[in-house]
Amino acid sequence: MESTNALSISPVDLFWAAGPVGKLVMALLIAASVWCWFLILESFYGLTRLRRAVRNAGKGRANKLGGIFAAGAEAAHQPIDQETAGERRQRIMEAMMRCARILLVRAEGGLPNLAVIASVAPFVGLFGTVWGIMTAFSGIAEAKDTSLAVVAPGIAEALAATAYGLAAAIPAAFAYNRLVASFTRLGQELSDLVEDHAVGVLRGRNLKEAA
C-alpha cells in the first residue's frame, strides 16, 4: 500500500514544502532564472538586428549604421595641417569606431549580467542545499529518529535548492559564452566595415582635393 505522505518531486510542491529560508532561496533563483531568459532574448534580438545592419551596409544599403558613416564624413571634413594620409585615415576610423562601440554596447543589452547569474546562482543554490541539510539534521535531533520520514523533507529541500540553482546558472552560462563569441565576431565584421569605409571616404576626399 502506498504511503499518503510520499513527497512529490514537482518543483512547485517542493517549493511549498520547503521552510521559510528554503522558499526565499528558491524564490530568488526563480527570479534570477526569469531575468536570465529576458536578458538572453534581449541580447539575441540586439545581435540579430545589428548583424543584419552590418550585412546590409556591406551591400551598400542605408540602415541604422548611418550614424557611423556620418561620423566618418564629419571627421574627413575637418582636416588638420601637416596631417599625413595615414594619420587622417586613422582619425576617421577612430571617429567611426566610437559610434560603432556605442551601437555594440546597446545591442549587448544586459549581457554582462548573464555572467553574474551564471557565477552567483550555483552558490545561492548551495546555500539552500546546506540549509536543507541542516534542517534534516535538526529534524533528526528533535525526533531522535533517523528514519527516512524524518530526514526526507530536509534532504528534498536541499536537493530542490540545488536544482533551482542549476536551472538558473546553466542557461545563463551557455547563453553568455555563445553570445559573447557572436558579438566578438560581429565586432570584427563591424571593424572591417569601418576600415573599408574609412579608406573609401579618404579616397573620395583626396579625389575632391585633387580636382
Image (cartoon, rainbow, N blue to C red):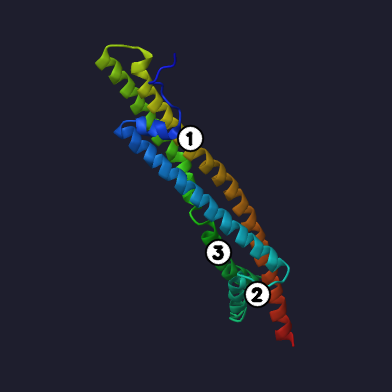
> Of helix, strand and loop, which one carries label 2?
loop
Tell me which numbered mark, 2 or 3, is placed earlier along the sequence: 2
> Of helix, strand and loop, which one carries label 3?
helix
Compare residues 138 and 12 and report the one nearer the observer. 12
Mark 3 closeness class: few <14, some 14–19, many ≥20 residues within 10 Å: some
Mark 1 closeness class: few <14, some 14–19, many ≥20 residues within 10 Å: many
Foreground: disc 2 or disc 1: 1
**Relative horizontal placement of residue 144, taking residue 174 as reference (left or right):** left
Label 1 is placed on what type of residue?
Leu
Q: Position of residue 43 (x, y in %)?
A: 54, 54
Tell me which numbered mark, 1 or 3, is placed earlier along the sequence: 3
Q: Position of residue 79 (x, y in %)?
A: 60, 80
Which residue is found at the position 38% from the left and 15% from the top?
Answer: 148
Q: Determine contact: label 2, label 1, CB under 8 Å.
A: no
Foreground: disc 2 or disc 3: 3
Label 2 is placed on what type of residue?
Thr
- Residue denoted by label 1: 166
- Residue denoted by label 2: 84
Determine the image quadrant of residue 207: bottom right
User: Residue 178, relative to residue 50: is it above or below?
Assistant: above
Foreground: disc 1 or disc 3: 1
- Residue denoted by label 3: 103
Q: The C terminus lies in which quarter of the figure? A: bottom right
Label 3 is placed on what type of residue?
Leu
What separation in Å lies between label 1 and label 3 (alpha carbons)?
Answer: 32 Å
Q: The N terminus lies in which quarter of the figure? A: top left
> Of helix, strand and loop, which one carries label 1?
helix
